[in-house]
Structure formats: structure tokens, C-alpha cells
Image (tube, rainbow, N blue to C red):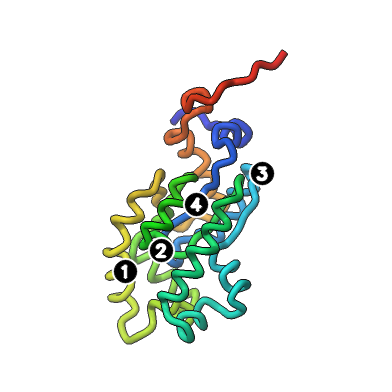
Amino acid sequence: MNHFASPNSLKKTLGGRNIYLVGMMGSGKSRTGPPLAKQLAYGFVDLDAIIETVVGKSIFKIFEDEGENYFREIEYKVLQEVGQRHSLVVATGGGVVISSQNWGILHQGIVIWLDPGCQRLLLRLQKDDLERRPLLQGNDPQGTLEALLAQREPLYSEADLHVAVTDETADAVSKMILSQLPSILKSPEDRGVPQTTED
């Protein structure tokens, strides 16, 4: 696009719909969310942080003590609660896309896939401490990551917007999203919403 839609006009076109950031662990959802929310005058929530508060332990400990199925149940319940609110940028967990019932909530908003690619993800995660990543435990974190990505990529591709990222700052990624959002958004009149006239 040659023009850059202003955050105010984007906010109007969004009409309060939530923006859900999806992507693999390490894709930058939690870092990109706050500057994106600030630009749109939206609120920001991190789904994993809410889950940790609700359960009273870290994601790693939840997986270790209760197992993945328990975590997915809590994740769905928290996502349901968040989905009842509006005007939020939501950083989701990497596996939120594997449940069809989650998609029922995600598709009520705008879903954006942040995609750094497998090698960049692995580099980021190694810097970020693999010990905090319950699904990457074992002797072959790269093989596990590649398998997870192969399983989830078709699901991530159901997102409304696919944003390929490299080593940009969170601010830069949020601006990339803002510049690409108009290409997928319909204005209120295009969605059949009556327009009010102003004197």
C-alpha cells in the first residue's frame, strides 16, 4: 500500500474487535503487543500471564505438575473470558491454535500470525533459556521445534494476516502490522454498519 492509514482511522474500522497475535513461542507476541496496543489506544493482555496468575504457578510448572491437557482447558477458559471484552491486543500462547474451540473465539477478532521462521525462532529461544519452554525439553530441542512448527504452520496460516518478521524491534513490528492491517479490514459501511453523519 502506498498510503499509511492513521491509527485513529484503523481503530474506527476495527470497531472494537480484538486483535489476537498468534505464532510459535519466541515469535515476539508478548513484546509486540504493548506497542501495537498503544498505537491503537487498545488495552493489552498476555494470555499466558493471566493463566499463571489464575493457577498461581508458572506455565512450566503447570505443564510439569498438571500436564498439557489441564493447561489447554485453563487456556480455553481464559480465552473465553478475554473474548468477551473488546478493544484488546491479545498475545496468545504458541499452542492456542491447536484447538478448534479456541478458533471459534479467535475468529471473532482479527488474528495476526507473527512468523520469524524456524532457524530464527531457535536462536531466539536459545537466548531466552529453553528451560522455561516445557514443550522443548529433551535432547533435541531443534528437532522438537521443527516438528511442532510443521504441525502448527497449517493452523497459523488460518490467520487473517501473516507477518514475516526478522530481527526488527517490537516497535517496528507493530508498525509493520499497522501498515498491513488496512489490506484485510473492511470499513464499517462495507460491513453493513449504518454510518452516522456529523454536522
Mark 4 or 3: in front is: 4
Q: Are marks 1 and 2 in contact (CB under 8 Å)?
A: yes
Q: Quadrant of the N terminus?
A: top left
Name the foreground residue: 12 vs 36: 12
* The label number, if any, that marks residue 41 in the structure image: 3
Q: Of marks 3 and 2, which one's residue comes earlier in the chain?
A: 2
Q: Secondary structure at mark 2?
A: loop
Q: Amino acid at mark 1?
A: Leu
Q: Of marks 4 and 3, which one's residue comes earlier in the chain?
A: 4
Task: Kindly identify which residue carries mark 1.
Answer: 148
Residue 60 x/y as whole percent: 49, 80
Q: Could you tell me which residue is drawn at 32 percent across and 56 percent down? A: 155
Name the foreground residue: 89 vs 126: 89
Quarter of the figure with residue 46: bottom right
The answer to whether residue 165 shows anywhere in this view is no
At label 4, counting other C-alpha atoms closer than 10 Å, the crowd grade (few under 14, some 14-19, many 20 or more) is many
